[in-house]
Image: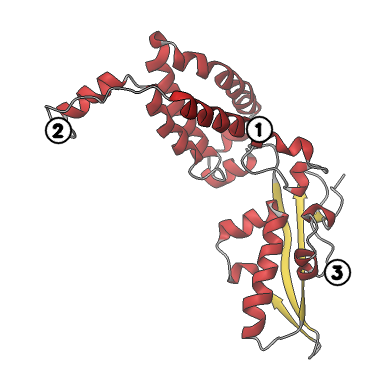
Amino acid sequence: MQLAAQRTGNHFLVDDWVKYLFAYGGLLFDLLIGPLLLLKKTRSYAIVAAIFFNLTNSYVFNDIFIFPFFMIGALLVFLDPERVFERLKKWGIVRENATEEQGRNLGRMGAALLAVYVVVQLAVPLRHYFIPGYTDWTGEGQRFSWRMKIQHRSIEEMTFAILDLDKKVIHEINPSDHLFPDEVQQMAYSPQMILQFAQYLHDTIAPLNGVENCWVKSKVKVKFNGKDAAYIFNPTLDLIEAARSGKEVRTFIEPEPR
């Protein structure tokens, strides 16, 4: 909330009552919004509340990008299809003589495919329980999971270096010269992205500097959930060797800060 207050200039966001409002208000919203959307009597109010909730999230938390607007778009599935169809005809979006298509039974194959889809949507977000290591720190299993807004990282240091083994020359690399600001920020959260960027430096940037045989190393130090700053990878580690080893990224990540 402190970052949101600094970014927006609304310093009341750091007040204790606002923190409690977001914490417990968000909890109540998540618990109640489903039933309220399903009940016809409360659906209209729930849709308005959901739109307000997601727009507020978009304003306060600028690191969730387009997600709130996807959630607002998903509210369309709760609208009465007959009323929507009539409104579209009134606005001239569909022809006056257009008729709604009759639904068809899924059949066994359709039901089976739907069941597989539901199982995947439920199982994949839980995969981190079967991956060794602390997911919040290693980043493995963090994407496409129900783990939003449970960690914060601030970048203390982020530099890369291409070490020319033949000429004994070090080329310092500022990632901001090659990536968008959001990509640099996301790299602090995703060790896998650090390895991918190192591979890019090796394959693309090194040859442009006349480097044929090199190591790529990093100094990426972050503060993780208010703990002491720590390096994600050991600064002496050759990231190219790590990326090509075939081992899981967690094998090379430094221990989580205490």
Which residue ends up furthest to the bottom in the rendered image?
A: 167
Residue lying farthest to the top in this orientation: 41
Question: Quick check: 170 above or below 234?
Answer: below
Q: Amino acid at mark 3?
A: Thr
Q: Which circle's residue, 1 or 2, is located before the other in the chain? A: 2
Q: Locate residue 210, reporting x and y percent.
A: 67, 89
Q: Nearer the viewer, residue 7 or 107?
A: 107
Instruction: Point out the image quarter for the C terminus.
Output: top right
In front: 118, or 205?
118
The image quarter containing residue 133 is: top right
Residue 213 at x, y percent in the picture:
76, 84
Q: Cα distance, mark 1 to mark 2? A: 43 Å
Q: Which residue is mark 1?
A: 123
Q: Amino acid at mark 1?
A: Ala
Is 130 displayed left or right of 114 in the figure? Answer: right
Q: Give how far apart the Cα atoms at labels 1 and 3 are.
A: 37 Å
Identify the residue at image location x=16%, y=28%.
98
According to the picture, the residue beneath numbered tag 3 turns out to be 236
> What residue is shown with label 2?
92
- Report whether 48 appears left or right of 220: left
Q: Is 132 placed above or below 15 here?
A: below
| Left or right relative to 254: residue 170 | left
| Above or below, comparing residue 161 to residue 90 in the picture | below
